Amino acid sequence: MKIDFNVEMKDFNGKAINDQDKKAVTFKDICINALMGVLETDRTLTGNQKFELYMIAKKVHSGGVIDIGINDIKVIQDRVDKMYNCLMVGRVREIFNQCTD
């Protein structure tokens, strides 16, 4: 599925969400942080599972429109669900729901 990872994340009023440096936060930023961040449950991940997260993050890092598989989307969504607040979870799901083949 083709997804644009350079989309800026917006609040409920449609205003861009900025990071601490006043730079707009992108979909790519959220996905990379979710994939590379450490959850309490990550202590039990195998090396292969960690490598899978790394490989997905490496693909997403290139930014722009990326052709990404449904399994990678599920992994990203699961990580975002665990790491982010309701606004980010909702926005990420909206973007994934709009993706095309």
Image: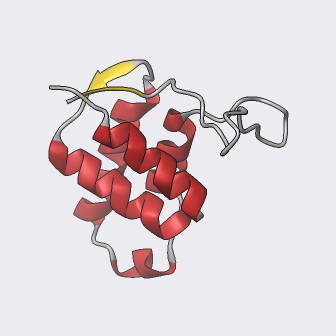
Residue 87 shown left or right of residue 81 in the figure:
right
Q: Residue at x 67, y 34 (%)?
A: 14
Q: How many marks?
A: 0
As rendered, which of 29 and 96 lies closer to the eye? 96
As rendered, which of 32 and 95 lies closer to the eye? 95
Residue farthest to the top, as pictured: 64
- Residue 85 picture location, percent across and down: 60, 64
Residue 30 shown left or right of residue 70 in the figure:
right
**Image quarter of the N terminus:** top left
Q: Which color scheme did the rendering employ for the protein?
A: secondary structure
- Residue 31 picture location, percent across and down: 47, 45
Q: Residue at x 30, y 41 (%)?
A: 97
- Residue 20 picture location, percent across and down: 84, 43
Q: Does residue 38 appear anywhere in the picture?
A: no
In the image, is residue 49 above or below residue 52?
below
In the image, is residue 30 above or below residue 7?
below
Q: Residue at x 44, y 64 (%)?
A: 81
Q: Quadrant of residue 70?
A: top left
Residue farthest to the front, as pictured: 13
In the image, is residue 47 above or below residue 33?
below
Q: Residue at x 70, y 39 (%)?
A: 13
Q: Quadrant of residue 101?
A: top left
- Residue 61 picture location, percent across and down: 45, 30
As rendered, which of 50 and 97 lies closer to the eye? 97
Q: Does residue 32 appear anywhere in the picture?
A: yes
Q: Quadrant of residue 47?
A: bottom left
